[in-house]
């Protein structure tokens, strides 16, 4: 049990080194067993590309957990379209209520010392998009 005021989270990653990834595949093979046994409050999942599969595995997320949708790529300098993000959040809400969803980049912008192939300005634009989109969805 975590001390009061501590939020426990886990990020499930497919690799993030200099804008490269190391694994692909959806969450379906692991979702039921993993999501139900994790002793965390938040589950941060990569959903920035087709490599992650669909949102169907989210049906296994227990009601006491929040899913943080990593819809913003930390590997690709192109800024995502907000309408696409809103549509994908809506799709995910068919499996987890929108009140238990959140939005983030799919991984860190510098998971290694070398970082990823994005400029600081590109990173800031993506973080601003997270904030603007979150305000539209959650107020």
Image (cartoon, helix red, strand yellow):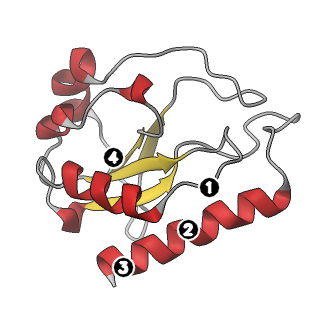
Label 2 vs 1, first from the N-terminus: 1
Distance from Cα at disc 1 to Cα at disc 4: 30 Å
Distance from Cα at disc 2 to Cα at disc 4: 26 Å
Q: Residue at x 14, y 60 (%)?
A: 97
Label 1 vs 3, first from the N-terminus: 1
Q: In which quadrant is the C terminus drawn?
A: bottom left
On residue 79, the disc is 1
Q: Residue at x 44, y 71 (%)?
A: 133
On residue 129, the disc is 2
Distance from Cα at disc 2 to Cα at disc 1: 8 Å
Distance from Cα at disc 1 to Cα at disc 3: 17 Å
Which quarter of the figure has residue 52? top left
Q: Number of numbered discs present?
A: 4
On residue 136, the disc is 3
Label 4 vs 3, first from the N-terminus: 4
- State which mark lies toward you, 2 or 4: 2
Residue 1 x %, y %:
32, 51
| Secondary structure under the numbered disc 3 in the rendered image | helix
Dots 2, 1 in contact, CB < 8 A: yes
- State which mark lies toward you, 1 or 4: 1
| Secondary structure under the numbered disc 2 in the rendered image | helix
Q: Which residue is mark 4?
A: 40
Which quarter of the figure has residue 127? bottom right
Label 3 vs 2, first from the N-terminus: 2
């Amino acid at each position: 049990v975590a001390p009061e005021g501590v939020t426990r989270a886990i990020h499930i990653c497919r690799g993030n080194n200099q804008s490269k990834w190391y694994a692909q595949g959806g969450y379906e093979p692991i979702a039921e067993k993993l999501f139900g046994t994790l002793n965390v409050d938040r589950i941060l999942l990569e959903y920035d590309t087709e490599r992650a599969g669909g949102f169907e595995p989210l049906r296994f997320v227990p009601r006491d957990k929040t899913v943080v949708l990593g819809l913003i790529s930390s590997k690709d300098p192109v800024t995502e379209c907000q309408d696409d993000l809103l549509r994908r959040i809506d799709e995910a809400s068919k499996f987890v209520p929108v009140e238990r969803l959140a939005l983030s980049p799919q991984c860190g912008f510098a998971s290694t010392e070398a970082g990823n192939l994005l400029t600081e300005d590109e990173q800031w634009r993506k973080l601003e998009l997270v904030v603007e989109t979150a305000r539209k969805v959650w107020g």
